[in-house]
Image (spheres, rainbow, N blue to C red):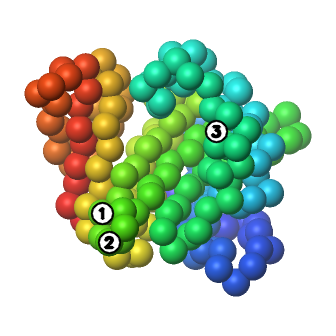
Amino acid sequence: MDATPTQTPTDGPDYPRHLIEDWRLPDGTQVIIRPIRPEDLALETAFVAGLSRETGYRRLLSPRQLQPDELWRFTHIDYEWELALIATAHIAGAEQQLAVARYVRDCQGEQAEFAIVVGDAWQASGLGTKLLQSLIRAAAQAGVRRLSASTLSSNEGMLALARKLGFQLLRDPGDMTVTYLSMTL
């Protein structure tokens, strides 16, 4: 299903254009997966605001709301040390963000922590699998050797996705409500 991208952002020389890809959801919705840009602040803000309380809680492991400075930081990234891939589609004539997956390297650069969140309307559509596969591939190409994350042990969707893609799962012995995910690339 992957195809040549139909649109390419005209960003600076550091923008990782090679990571842009077109993809289709099973219902035929055309999706573009691409690295996030500073200009995506409004998209990211609307995406986060549109998440249900449950989805937001699963992503942040708490009921807190992201602050404007955090959202700004999520869209203004140093591609050498981190990457955020967003999935967008044109819905009712406007570009909308459907999901985001990101990693941030540690100070040595060989390990990275990752996170993924798929908008409620797009969960169980295959988008999470595709987006995380794209993030894993990009991390490996960038020299990341290990990806890790933590999730709620009750987050069955994330645990199933992690198992499907080959992550190792380990419950935190000090807090059984948290499961650690890791993968050697």
Task: Tell me if I can see residue 73 in this picture.
Answer: yes
| Residue 135 vertical placement versus 93 (above, below) | below
Contact? badges 1 and 2 (CB < 8 Å): yes
For the residues marked 1 and 2, what is the alpha-carbon distance in whole angstroms?
7 Å
Earlier residue among tags 3 and 1: 3
Amino acid of disc 1: Gln
| Residue 104 vertical placement versus 96 (above, below) | below
Residue drawn 75% across and 59% down?
38
Contact? badges 3 and 2 (CB < 8 Å): no
Percent coordinates x, y for residue 157 in the rendering = 36, 27
Binning the other alpha carbons within 10 Å of mark 2 as few (below 14), some (14 to 19) or many (20 upward) gives few
Residue hosting label 3:
98
Binning the other alpha carbons within 10 Å of mark 3 as few (below 14), some (14 to 19) or many (20 upward) gives many
Q: Please tell me whether mark 3 or mark 2 is closer to you in this view.
A: 2
Residue hosting label 2:
108
Q: Nearer the viewer, residue 14 or 134?
A: 14
Residue drawn 26% across and 27% down?
178
For the residues marked 3 and 2, what is the alpha-carbon distance in whole angstroms?
32 Å
Residue drawn 44% across and 44% down?
115
Farthest residue in the right direction?
93
Amino acid of disc 3: Leu
Residue hosting label 1:
111
Does dot 3 land on a helix, a strand or a loop?
strand
